[in-house]
Amino acid sequence: MTNARLLADLMDHAHAMTLQQLEHLQQHDLHQRFTVNRMELNSAFWIVAHLAVSENWLILKGTNGPFQKFSWAKQFTLGATPPAPAECPPIEEIMNTLERVHRLALDHVAGLSDADLASPHQALMNLDSGSDMRAVITHHLRHVNMHNGQLAWLCKLHGLPTI
C-alpha cells in the first residue's frame, strides 16, 4: 500500500463517519442551531456544506487536483456568517456536491506519488504541520474529524445515539 493510498483510505473512513452521523440526524431539522453557554453552535447543514467546501479547497485545490466551482461555496467557508435556511441550496445539492468532491479527492490523492506528497501544497494557508501536500491532507483529516465531533454533539443534543 502506498502512502497516498493510506491517506485516501483515511479520508474515506472519516467521510463515512460524517455520513453515519448525518443519517442519524436526517429526521431532525438540519438547520437547527443550539446555543451552549451563550455560544451558537454550527448547524448540521452548515457543517456538511462546509465540509464540501473545505475538501474541495484543501484537497483538490491544495494538491493540484480537479478543483470544483459551485455557486454557494463562499456561504460556507471559514468565518462566513451562516445563511438563513431560505437562502441555502437544497440539502440534496449539498450532499451531491459533497459526494462528487469526495470521490474526486479520493481518486486524486490515491494517485499521488511520494514526491507529490513532499511538494508544496497550493491551499494558500500556513499550516502548523508543514507546507507540503502531505501536511494539507493530514490537516484535512483533522478538520473533518473535528467536525464529526460537532455532528456527534448535535446527535447528543437531539437525544440520538452516537455509537
Image (cartoon, grey):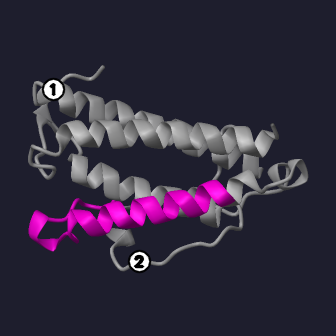
- Vertical comparison of 53 with 11: above or below: below
- Vertical comparison of 61 with 29: above or below: below
What is the x, y in percent for residue 148? 37, 35
In the image, taking residue 33 as reference, residue 55 lies left or right, namely right
Q: Which residue is mark 1?
A: 160
| Residue 96, magenta (yes or no) | yes
Indicate which disc, 2 or 1, sits on the residue closer to the N terminus. 2
- The crowding category of the residue bearing disc 1, from other C-alpha atoms within 10 Å (few below 14, some 14 to 19, many at least 20), is some
Tag of residue 96: none
Q: CA distance from mark 2 to mark 1?
A: 32 Å
Q: Is residue 153 visible?
A: yes
In the image, taking residue 26 as reference, residue 107 lies left or right, namely right
Give the residue furthest to the front: 1
Mark 2 or 1: in front is: 1
- The crowding category of the residue bearing disc 2, from other C-alpha atoms within 10 Å (few below 14, some 14 to 19, many at least 20), is few
Tell me which residue sits at (73%, 58%) in the image: 121
| The C terminus - image quarter | top left
Q: Is residue 127 visible?
A: no
The type of residue carrying mark 1 is Leu
Q: Secondary structure at mark 2?
A: loop
Q: Which residues are magenta?
A: 80-107
- Vertical comparison of 116 with 4: above or below: below
| The N terminus - image quarter | top right
Query: 79 or 48, which lies in front?
Result: 48
| Residue 79, magenta (yes or no) | no
Tag of residue 70: 2
Query: 123 or 65, which lies in front?
Result: 65
What is the x, y in percent for residue 58? 58, 57
Q: Main secondary structure of the magenta part?
A: helix
